[in-house]
Image: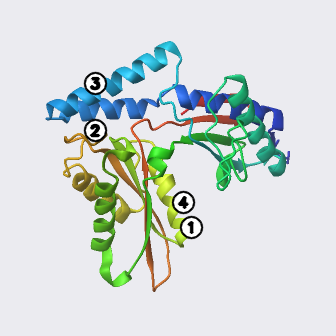
Amino acid sequence: MNAVKRLMVEPAAIEEAAKLLYIRALKLLPDDIKQGFTRLDAGETGATAKSVLATMIENIRVAEKTENLLCQDTGIPIYNVLIGREVEVDGSALKAAIRRGVERATKEHPLRSSIVHPLTRANEQTSCGALVPVINIDFTERERELRLEMVPKGSGSENGSFLKMAIPADGVDAIKAFVVDRVIEAGGKVCPPTIVGVGVGGTSDLCMHLAKVAATRALGSVCADPQGAVLEKELSQAVNSLGIGPQGLGGDSTSFAVHVELAATHITMNPVAVNIQCHSARRASATFTPGGVEIGF
C-alpha cells in the first residue's frame, strides 16, 4: 500500500499569506456581511437609521473601489490556524512566519500600527508586541489542508467584552439577561450594527474565547448545538427590539445577529461571555492544499 503523500507548508508561504491576509481583511468586506447590510436596510423602519446604513454601505463601496481601508483602526491582528490530517508544518516556524507577515504588512503597505506595550504604551510600529499577533492553533479532520484565517479586531468592538460567572440555578434566563444588559451598556460605542458573540460554559478563559469565535463567525452560520441555535434566535430578536440602532442613533438594526458557542462546564458554575464585533466585520483566509493556495474569506 502506498503511503499518503503529506502536504508540506513552508514558512515562507505562511509569511506571505499572513501579510496578504492582513491587508485584504482591512480592505475587503466579506460577502455575507454585505448581504447582512442589504437585509437590515430592507427591514429598517427608521429614517435616521436608514440614512446611517446608507452611509455605511457607501463607505464600503468607496473603500473597495479605491483600495482604501474600511476603517482606520487596523485592530489587534488575530490568526486562526486549522491544521488538517497529513499536513507537515513546523509549528514554531509557523508562528514566527505569521509575525514576520504582520510586520511586513505594517511596514510595506504601510498600515497604522495599533499595538503598544500595556504599561509604557510604547509602539514598535510593527503591529506586533508581546504575544501579539494572537495566534490560535487547532486541528481538523480535513485531509492535506491547512487553513489560515486573519481577523483584525478593532478596539471599539473589543472594548465590548464582558464575562460573568453565572449561578447555574438561575438558568438560561440569567444568560439572556446578561447578554441583553451588556448590549444596552455598550450602546453605540461598539459601532452597531454588530455581531454579538456569546460564549456559554467551559472555564472563564475558554468562555471568552468562545465568545470571540462566535463574534467572528460568518453570518448565516448556526450554532452546532440545537439548544444553542434556539438561544441565538431568541437573543437576536431581543437585541434588535432594543431600539439602539446603527451607531446608537436609534432604529431596528442594532445587530446583524447574535451568535452562540457552547462548551461543557462544571456542575457548580455557568460562565457566560460577550464579545461584540462592529459593523466592519473584517476577516480573510488562505487555504493551503496540494493544488495551491486559495484566498477567500
Is any part of residue 53 visible from this angle? yes
The answer to whether 275 is drawn above or below residue 206 in the figure is above
| Callout 3 secondary element | helix
Q: Residue furthest top?
A: 66
Give neighbour class at mark 4: few <14, some 14-19, many 20+ (Cα, 10 Å). Answer: many
| CB contact under 8 Å: marks 1 and 3 | no
Q: Nearer the viewer, residue 107 or 209?
A: 107
- The residue wearing badge 3 is 54
Image point 61% across, 28% down: which residue? 23
Image point 33% across, 47% down: which residue? 257
- The residue wearing badge 2 is 246
Nearest-to-viewer mark from 1 and 2: 2
Q: Nearer the viewer, residue 65 or 267?
A: 65
Tell me the kind of residue under disc 4: His
> Where residue 50 appears, x then y in whole percent?
21, 29
Residue 18: mark: none
- The residue wearing badge 4 is 209
Q: Earlier in the sequence, mark 4 or mark 2?
A: 4
Answer with the quarter of the image where residue 75 lies: top right
Is any part of residue 10 visible from this angle? no
| Callout 1 secondary element | helix
| Callout 2 secondary element | helix
| CB contact under 8 Å: marks 1 and 4 | yes
Residue 205: mark: 1
Tell me the kind of residue under disc 1: Asp
Q: Residue furthest front?
A: 120
Q: Earlier in the sequence, mark 3 or mark 4?
A: 3
Q: Nearer the viewer, residue 94 or 163?
A: 163
Image point 24% across, 42% down: which residue? 245
| CB contact under 8 Å: marks 4 and 2 | no
> Where residue 208 appears, x then y in whole percent?
51, 62
